Image (cartoon, rainbow, N blue to C red):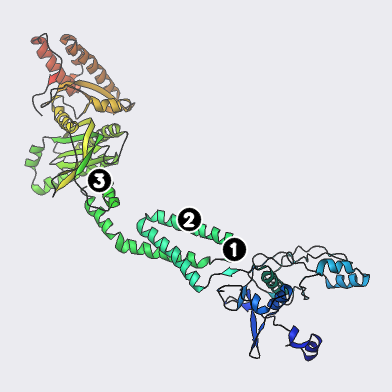
């Protein structure tokens, strides 16, 4: 309390009010009390008393306009600023102005205003407030009457401001009615739980990366929204909801990894050995068992088989045969999958694969041909490497055909496979077997050639009629990727091309002449040479169509 003489000078208790402020747990001043209990009686604080007198109302009325404050019996300060926002006058200048007799200056600047007389010093009565990160050089902004203004300071204040500005801010807030509106404890809990619930639901239902991005976006939106409404005197909690969301993100991620995604991981791990990854992902995304049904897709079907496998299986003990097949099938499967193919099934030593399903692939024909060439090269490496299988000369036959096929879950209601069916599949199977009639390892139908002609070096082998199909098929052999064929391949392809044209023109003598120099190094040329010699000795009838009808599969 002031000294007795001071109390008498100001009219005793009618004009004495508390200057107490409210310090938050971090010792920062963000609020002032509405009232202070003195000798058992609640009295309004100085700011409330001054604002009430300025408005001509009772302090009890002005102290009730704030609803559900975060801290009872306090007002949350909405800082305009310090000396740069609240007019601050020099007492020495006002004394000189009074001596000058300039009453108009006083009426112009103080009439109808609440005036606080206090020190604005750098050494005492300073408070750390919520404005501590936005302080500026303290240059009193009030105009001068008689004395010149000092040069402006360029020294930034510390993280504190003179205490008089705390009370001046409170008076302004109460008069204008723009003190901060804070959410109470319940409001902070509700907003924190809302962001945490949103984050948890997103983490449990969306891919983890999408959930993290959604959390970051929600945090940014919440921060921007809190900043916007803060300008309009509504103080939303900023840290608590973000921390709650972060905790929810971590907890939901742990729950998802340990519990929710366990079944999905088990499904992927279990079926990865049987189905294409794309099929598994489709099953997981659908969250329901696969069902019978299919769709028509444009694909390239890949059939491969080992020549002479029966003799190999007879020569090996069962454990050795299993080891041999696993090594061979693993090598071929890796190549097929590297080029985007889906292995449909294994039939003994045969491999059935599809390019263009279940994942769409606009270049499925080129990828299938590329895979076939790499399989051929890998098999050649098998034959060259000094392994225990070197005693076998492994030969492979691959058939390729492109076109529309039925792709989907096909089988019985109790058991079915994701597979491919249709005429396109049958032709690919026939072309695989047709290799033995030409001495080739890879044979592709014209449908595949048309889709991948520009990417590879080819030679047309013949036009054939396979068993079970009346329509002739033009068949081609891919030699190498375009521009990578060897000089020998170029010579053989040119000779065979000329010989095939002679064959179709019934000029069997020219066909024989073209093939004789190269037949020793090229099985297809040697086979066509023998056929030409037979027809030269026994010319065909006039209705001969130059189509080679194969007698077996």
Locate residue 123 relative to residue 389 in the image: left or right.
right
User: Closer to the N terminus: mark 2 or mark 1?
Assistant: 2
Please tell me whether mark 1 sits on a helix, a strand or a loop.
helix
Identify which residue is drawn at 55% across, 62% down.
226
Count of numbered marks: 3
As drawn, the label of residue 156 is: none
Identify which residue is drawn at 19% across, 31% down.
424
Q: Quadrant of the N terminus?
A: bottom right
Between disc 2 and disc 3, the foreground one is: 2
Between disc 2 and disc 1, the foreground one is: 1
Please tell me whether mark 2 sits on a helix, a strand or a loop.
helix
Return the residue at label 2.
217
Return the residue at label 3.
276
User: Does 543 appear above or below 420?
Assistant: above
Q: Quadrant of the C terminus?
A: top left
Locate residue 88 relative to residue 522 in the image: left or right.
right
Quadrant in which residue 549 is drawn: top left
Query: Where's residue 515, x and y in %?
Result: 19, 16
Return the residue at label 1.
230
Q: Residues within 10 Å of mark 1 (few under 14, many from 20)?
A: some
The residue closer to the viewer here, 468 or 31, is 31
User: Closer to the N terminus: mark 1 or mark 3?
Assistant: 1
Q: Residue furthest left?
A: 314
Q: Are marks 1 and 3 in contact (CB under 8 Å)?
A: no
Locate residue 468 relative to residue 257 in the image: left or right.
left
Query: Where's residue 389, x and y in %?
Result: 15, 41
Please tell me whether mark 3 sits on a helix, a strand or a loop.
loop
């Amino acid at each position: 309390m002031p000294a007795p003489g001071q109390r008498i000078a100001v009219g005793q208790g009618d004009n004495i009010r508390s200057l107490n402020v409210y310090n938050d747990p971090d010792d920062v001043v963000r609020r002032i009390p509405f009232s202070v209990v003195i000798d058992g009686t609640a009295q309004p604080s100085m700011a409330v008393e001054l604002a009430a007198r300025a408005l001509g109302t009772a302090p009890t009325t002005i102290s009730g306009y704030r609803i559900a404050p975060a801290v009872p019996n306090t007002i949350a300060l909405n800082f305009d600023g310090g000396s740069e926002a609240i007019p601050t006058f020099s007492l020495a200048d006002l004394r000189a102005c009074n001596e000058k007799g300039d009453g108009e200056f006083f009426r112009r600047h103080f009439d109808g205003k609440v005036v606080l007389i206090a020190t604005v010093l750098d050494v005492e009565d300073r408070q750390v407030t919520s404005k501590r990160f936005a302080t500026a050089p303290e240059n009193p902004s009030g105009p001068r009457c008689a004395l010149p203004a000092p040069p402006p300071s360029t020294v930034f204040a510390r993280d504190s401001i003179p205490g008089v500005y705390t009370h001046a801010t409170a008076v302004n807030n109460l008069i204008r009615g723009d003190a901060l509106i804070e959410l109470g404890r319940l409001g902070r809990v509700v907003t924190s739980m809302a962001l945490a619930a949103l984050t948890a639901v997103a983490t449990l239902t969306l891919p983890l990366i999408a959930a993290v991005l959604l959390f970051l976006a929600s945090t940014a939106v919440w921060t921007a929204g809190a900043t916007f409404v803060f300008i309009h005197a509504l103080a939303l909690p900023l840290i608590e909801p973000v921390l709650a969301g972060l905790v929810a993100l971590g907890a939901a991620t742990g729950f998802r990894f340990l519990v929710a995604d366990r079944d999905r991981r088990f499904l992927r791990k279990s079926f990865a050995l049987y189905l294409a990854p794309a099929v598994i992902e489709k099953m997981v995304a659908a969250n329901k068992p696969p069902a019978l049904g299919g769709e028509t897709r444009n694909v390239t079907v890949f059939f491969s088989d080992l020549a002479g496998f029966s003799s190999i299986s007879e020569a090996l003990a069962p454990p050795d045969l299993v080891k041999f097949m696993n090594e061979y099938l693993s090598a071929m499967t890796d190549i097929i999958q590297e080029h985007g193919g889906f292995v449909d099934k294994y039939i003994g030593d045969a491999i059935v694969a599809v390019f263009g399903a279940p994942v769409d692939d606009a270049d499925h024909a080129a990828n299938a041909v590329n895979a076939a060439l790499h399989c051929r090269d890998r098999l050649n490496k098998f034959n060259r490497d000094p392994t225990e299988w070197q005693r076998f000369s492994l030969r492979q036959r691959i058939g390729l055909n492109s076109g529309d096929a039925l792709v989907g879950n096909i089988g019985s209601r109790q058991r079915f496979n994701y597979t491919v069916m249709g005429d396109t599949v049958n032709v690919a199977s026939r072309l695989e077997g047709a290799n033995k009639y030409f001495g080739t390892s890879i044979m592709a139908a014209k449908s595949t050639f048309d889709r991948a002609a520009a990417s590879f070096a080819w030679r047309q082998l013949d036009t054939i009629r396979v068993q079970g199909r009346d329509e002739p098929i033009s068949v081609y052999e891919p030699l190498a990727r375009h521009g990578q064929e060897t000089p020998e391949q170029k010579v053989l392809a040119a000779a065979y091309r000329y010989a095939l044209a002679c064959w179709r023109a019934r000029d069997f003598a020219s066909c024989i002449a073209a093939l004789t120099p190269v037949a020793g190094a090229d099985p297809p040329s040697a086979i066509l040479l023998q056929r030409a010699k037979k027809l030269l000795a026994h010319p065909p009838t006039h209705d001969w169509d130059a189509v080679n009808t194969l007698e077996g599969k």
